[in-house]
Image: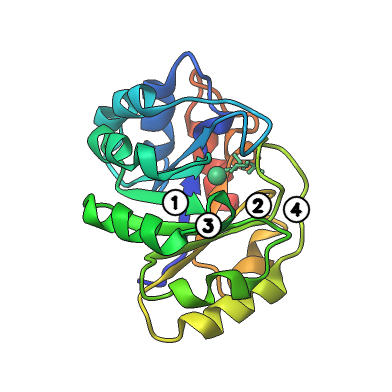
Amino acid sequence: DRRIKISPSILSADFADFGREIRGIEDQGADWVHVDVMDGHFVPNLTFGPPAVAAFRPHVRTVMDVHLMIAPVDPFIEAYAAAGADILTAHVEAGPHPHRTLQAIRAAGMKAGVALNPGTPAAAVAHLMDLADLVCVMTVNPGFGGQSFLDMTGKIAELRTMIGDRPVHIEVDGGVTPETAPLVTKAGADVLVAGSAVFRGGSADEPAAYGANIASI
Ligand code: DX5
Ligand code: ZN
């Protein structure tokens, strides 16, 4: 299914009201819900871990798209499966054995994603295509919402060629706005993560504002 999907990042949501924020974006047309897990080590910021992700689960009616910005990954895979992640994405830079990590994610019953930092070439995931359900192309250096878009359209196009006819999504994460979204979809991306662009001007008090923002992306 190559229809363009929007996966709003709740990194830009009200952290004291995730249930309502998730309901708000889904009611307004979000296809997936993107959950950014940061460990203060792989990236210079900290968010939440498995107990919080488990608490989000009953509020997510669509697809819980969990992006791990942590290292190591392998010791936590079972915990995110138990927390109810549908898709679990690990960074290719997070450890020396990405095949093992992706196999373990699938073996735990989840879809497996592999993410690439902006400085990492497409070739780093060339040998992982049969083990991945999703490739996440970072268009910012991960760690914070609201950063400006880095042009990775060449990398996206290379990945689309590499994927061929396999059913692998290309997700783009970071600085996605109504201006940058067409660039990445044209290059071959089919899942757009957006944090600040979706929650901008929106709030738990006025969730309909998300809808206008989602539609504009
Ligand atoms: C960045 C996170 C992103 C982030 C995107 O480290 O992985 O998912 O929330 O935020 P925006 O859309 O504001 O760049
Ligand atoms: Zn993310």
Dot placed on the residue nearer the N-terminal end, 2 or 1: 1
Q: Which residue is denoted by mark 2 in the rendering?
A: 176
* Residue nearer the viewer, 177 or 174: 174
Residue plotted at (62% across, 79% down) = 157
Q: Which residue is denoted by mark 4 in the rendering?
A: 149
Secondary structure category for the residue under label 3: loop
Q: Are marks 3 and 2 in contact (CB under 8 Å)?
A: no
* Residue nearer the viewer, 125 or 33: 125
Q: Note whether 40 is above or below 112 in the view shown.
A: above
Residue plotted at (32% across, 37% down) = 80
Between the residue at mark 4 and the residue at mark 3, the CA separation in whole angstroms equals: 28 Å
Dot placed on the residue nearer the N-terminal end, 3 or 1: 1
Q: Which residue is denoted by mark 3 in the rendering?
A: 96
Ligand 1 lies under 8 Å from the Cβ of mark 2? yes
| Most distant residue in the front direction | 96
x and y, in percent, of residue 92 in the image? 54, 58
x and y, in percent, of residue 184 in the image? 64, 67
Q: What's the residue type where badge 1 is placed? A: Thr
Dot placed on the residue nearer the N-terminal end, 3 or 2: 3
